[in-house]
Image (cartoon, helix red, strand yellow):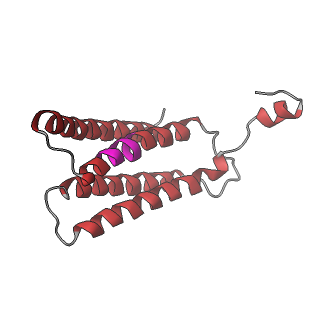
Amino acid sequence: MYTLVRRFIKTGILFLAAGLILGACMLVRREFYGVWPHPYLVSAHAHAILSGFVLYLILGVALWLFPRAGRDDTRYRPVRIEAAYWTLTAATVLRVTAEASRAWMDPPWQPWAIALGGLGQAAGIGLYFWTMWTRIRPVGSHLREARGERF
C-alpha cells in the first residue's frame, strides 16, 4: 500500500472520528437535554461520515486495487490523483465546518462557504474519476469471459 492510498484511508478515518464526535454530541444533547439537532449539524454529520469516511475509503481502496495504468495511458497521472485528494479534502473540511458552525451563527459569507465546499467536493470527485477512468479495465477477466467462464 503506497503513500497516497494510506493518505486517503487515514483521512477517511479522521473524518469518521469527526463525524462520530459530532454525532455523539447531537445524541447527548437530544437525549439528556431535549435539544434536537439543527439541520445544518445533521448535514455536517452526514458529510463527515459519508463524504469523508465512506468516500475516502472507497477512493483509497480503488486506487490501491485497480489495475496499474497502461504504459500508453496519457490520462492517469499520480499528480492528478493527489490534486483530487487535496481538492476533495479542503472542500470537505470547509463544508463540514461551515455547516456545523451555521447551527450557531449565520454570517453572510457562510452560504458561500458551504456552496464552495460542495462545488469543490464535486470537482475533486470528478477529477479523481476522470483520472482513474482508464484504470477501470479488464486484466485477464476478458479472456476468461471469452472462454465462457462466468463469475
Q: Is 48 placed left or right of 68 in the picture? A: left
Q: Residue at x 49, y 39 (%)?
A: 58
As drawn, which residue projects farthest toward the right? 147
Q: Main secondary structure of the magenta part?
A: helix
Which residue is situated farthest in the bottom direction here? 108
In magenta, the rendered stretch is 45-53
Q: Residue furthest front?
A: 34
- Residue 66, percent across and down? 61, 39
Quarter of the image with the C terminus is top right
Q: Is residue 49 magenta?
A: yes
* Magenta segment includes 136: no
Toward the viewer: 75 or 42? 42
- The answer to whether 58 appears left or right of 24 in the picture is right
Give the residue displayed 20% in from the left and 72% down from the top.
Answer: 108
Which quadrant of the figure has residue 147?
top right
Q: Nearer the viewer, residue 34 or 137?
A: 34
Rendering coords of residue 126 (x, y %): 52, 58
Give the x, y percent position of residue 9.
Answer: 41, 37
- Residue 107 coordinates in the image, percent (x, y): 16, 69
Number of numbered discs: 0
Q: Quadrant of residue 33?
A: top left
Foreground pick, 50 / 58: 50
